[in-house]
Image: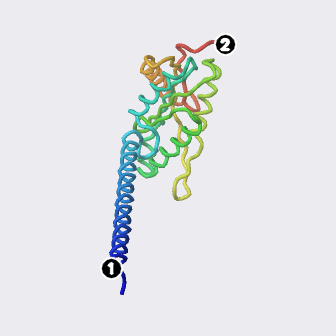
Amino acid sequence: MPDPMSVASGICAAGALLSSWQLRRRALRAEAEIEHLQAELAAERHAASHDPLTGLPNRRAFYRLAAALLTDAAGQPLIAIVLDLDDFKQINDRYGHAAGDQVLISVADRLAGFAGDNLVARLGGDEFAGLLASPTVDRRWIEHATRRLSETVAAPIRLSGCRSVRVTASVGLAPVTGPAQLTEALSRADAAMYQAKSLSGARPAHQLTDRTRLVER
């Protein structure tokens, strides 16, 4: 006959293994639940700070990130950019809102590609903004960069059904020197952008730099 003590020891060992396995399962479930909650929190934070259509930072995030960048800029020249598409309503009216969304996504991608590691955001509607590091505030360099950005936006955008459209953008730029100057610089860039838009057909691709504080060379 089996030794009763051996049987009891075996039962205790089996019970301990079962208890350990159950505890392990509970720990794994708890870890999975924590990871799930963390992922949900990260998704909520991302949604609160990013535009759902283009994936760019939204207006609130732009001001927060721009202020942080200006604080850490250590004297490096930074340029505030405001960009607004010309006659964007015609895209929606002619091709539909799905096409309009595709245009906004394409413009956002092009702006992000142009800016590289610099900050760009969608402020709302067809208005975008950026804060670009610049090697100089020389007028010629800034106007050259503005033309390149306008040309980048104006390249044909492929829509569904083998269609393509071209859009132009009015662009305003203004140097910004510190966190306290951000709102002022964006206001000047915005004013320059609207001045460019008022030129209508005076330029092939609307653009204007804020010249108030640009270096003449």
**Residue 124 placement: quadrant:** top left
- Residue at 52%, 59% in the rendered image: 161
- Seen from the viewer's position, the closer of residues 96 and 109 is 109
**Within-10-Å neighbours for mark 2: few <14, some 14–19, many 20+:** few
Sequence-earlier tag: 1 or 2: 1
Q: Quadrant of residue 59?
A: top left
Left or right? Give the position of 19 relative to 70: left
Q: Name the one closer to the observer, 85 or 27.
A: 27
Taking depth in this image into account, of 92 and 111 the one nearest to the observer is 111
Judge whether 97 appears above or below 181 on screen. Answer: below
Q: Residue at left 35%, top 51%? A: 37
**In this figure, what is the number of numbered marks?**
2
Q: Secondary structure at mark 2?
A: loop
Instruction: Name the secondary structure under disc 1.
Output: helix
**At which x and y percent is residue 117?**
57, 35
Residue type at tag 2 = Arg
Quarter of the figure with the N terminus: bottom left
Residue 140 - label: none
Q: Nearer the viewer, mark 1 or mark 2?
A: 1
Instruction: Give residue 103's position: percent from left, percent from top.
Output: 49, 46
The Cα atoms of the two marked residues, 1 and 2, are separated by 100 Å
The image quarter containing residue 18 is bottom left
Residue that protrudes farthest toward the right in the picture: 217
In the rendered view, does 8 fall on the left or right side of 62?
left
Which numbered dot is residue 4?
1
Residue behind mark 2: 217
